[in-house]
Amino acid sequence: MGFDGDDFLNCVVFVESNYSAEKTLETILSIEKKLGRIRSEKEGYTSRPIDIDILFFDDEIIKTKNLTVPHPRIQNRKFVLQPLVDISSEFQHPKLHKSLMELLKETNDESELIKQSKWLRNPVLDYDISKYRYVAIEGNIGAGKTSLAKQMASDFNAKLVLERFKENPFLPKFYKEPDRFAFPLEMSFLADRYQQLLDDLTQYDLFKENVIGDYDAYKSLIFAKITLQEEEYVLYRKLFHLMHKELPNPDVYVYLYQNTERLLENIKKRGRDFEQEIEAEYLQKINEGYMEFIRNQQNDKIKIIDISKMDFVNNRNDYIKVLKKILN
């Protein structure tokens, strides 16, 4: 449209994102650049290897120096309207107040379109999570277990179970005076984790739905062995085993291993005041505790993933690699 050249392949993609509109645009431009697009102010209508536009952003109306949403020429382009209608024919244009189907019927564009048989597919759909009704994601402090659990629960429409550490009043006190507050901290965590898992797992139909949690009940024993005196730990362990009998075990136990240096960087980056005094020695003890626990479990249920050189939060390829290791 607007010049002589080869045919274009056009498609429309519906995307869910936590990004703002400006951040989405920034990401899109970086993708174009990686695929060989060189933009110039005088580019105009011309062939190009890739051209990604933001057509709508929810039902927002945005007008900035870099971004106009909805895209101002949607209603004049059949090659945009038709695939939009294929995705969501009843979506209302927030400025024109008409459905996409209405706009397609009314457009003056008489271009001929040829529909391709191939549809884009979310790579997450290629992984079967049904065999794992209950997935527990574990790791050291700052390993990224909560981020991974949230992403997987969102992608696979699973129930998300997150540890309620923010509600524990002893945690900030423990990091300042560990000897004094270790026992009440671990006891409060034991009670809270037990109650949460009892509520969220035993009352949930694990035969029909998937559950993804960012911790496993045995976390209590691992941390208690590090923080408690020997006599305290013996008592704690008895209580733990009495309570744990009622809780289901995960179908797969994922341990995210990350080296101590990266852990400290992550802890510093997320900026929780009470965590800033955590020392490398303490993180190393936690890692050793997890590895000792893992050695005594059924190997076919446990998957250890070294993420020291990965960033599955910001790098989609790394996230897919982690999925493959868990679900393949």
Image (tube, rainbow, N blue to C red):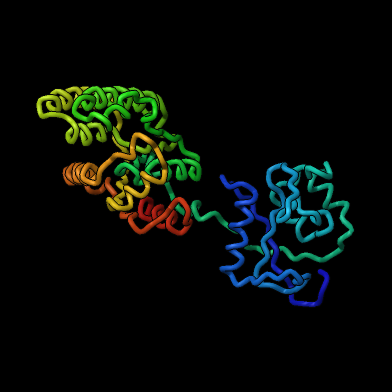
Tell me: 278 left or right of 167.
left
Residue depicted at 45% across the width and 41% down the height: 150
The structure residue drawn at horizontal position 39% and vertical position 37%, both measured from the top left corner, is 272
Where on the picture, by quarter, is residue 51?
bottom right
> Is residue 85 at least partly visible in the picture?
no
The structure residue drawn at horizontal position 50% and vertical position 42%, both measured from the top left corner, is 154
Place residue 112 in its image quadrant.
bottom right
x then y, percent, for residue 315: 47, 56
Q: Nearer the viewer, residue 47 or 228?
A: 228
Residue 89 location in percent, x, y? 75, 46
Is there any visible trace of residue 234 in the rendered image? yes
Taking depth in this image into account, of 188 and 279 the one nearest to the observer is 279
Left or right: 211 as drawn, with respect to 25: left
Q: Residue at x 43, y 38 (%)?
A: 210
Q: Give the answer, above or below, for where 110 lies relative to 94.
A: below
Screen quadrant of the C terminus: bottom left
